[in-house]
Amino acid sequence: MQALIARGITGDFRPPDLMRFGFAPLYNGFEDAWLAAASLSEILATREWDRTDFRRKQTVT
């Protein structure tokens, strides 16, 4: 989730492995959901999530 937040995509992480996104139809469109999914795919493919600065546990995600 920290890698997504660094890209400007806000979500929430719940241990042990749950990511939550709050899409509101009045504020978010199809493009927002597509961007979030594409960014998550890229983060996983490049292992960006494994960067040292993202390993530190945050008090609030």
Image (tube, rainbow, N blue to C red):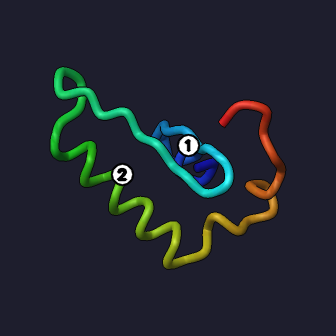
Distance between mark 1 and mark 2 Cα atoms: 10 Å
Image quarter of residue 32: top left
Residue 17 x/y as whole percent: 61, 57
The residue drawn where x is 61% and y is 44% is: 14
Q: Which residue is mark 2?
A: 36
The residue drawn where x is 78% and y is 39% is: 58
Relative to 34, is 60 on the left or the right? right
Relative to 25, is 8 on the left or the right? right
Q: The residue tagged with tag 2: helix, strand or loop?
A: helix
Image quarter of residue 52: bottom right
Using a 10 Å C-alpha cutoff, classify the residue at mark 1 as few (fewer than 14 neighbours), some (14 to 19) or many (20 or more): few
Residue 38 x/y as whole percent: 34, 62
Q: The residue tagged with tag 1: helix, strand or loop?
A: helix
Question: Looking at this view, is 42 or 58 the one in front?
Answer: 58
Question: Looking at this view, is 21 or 31 the one in front?
Answer: 21
Q: Is residue 25 above or below residue 21?
A: above
Q: Is residue 4 above or below residue 43?
A: above
Image quarter of residue 34: bottom left
Looking at the image, the residue that sits furthest to the top is 26
Q: Which residue is mark 1?
A: 5
Mark 2: which amino acid?
Ala
Q: Quadrant of the C terminus?
A: top right
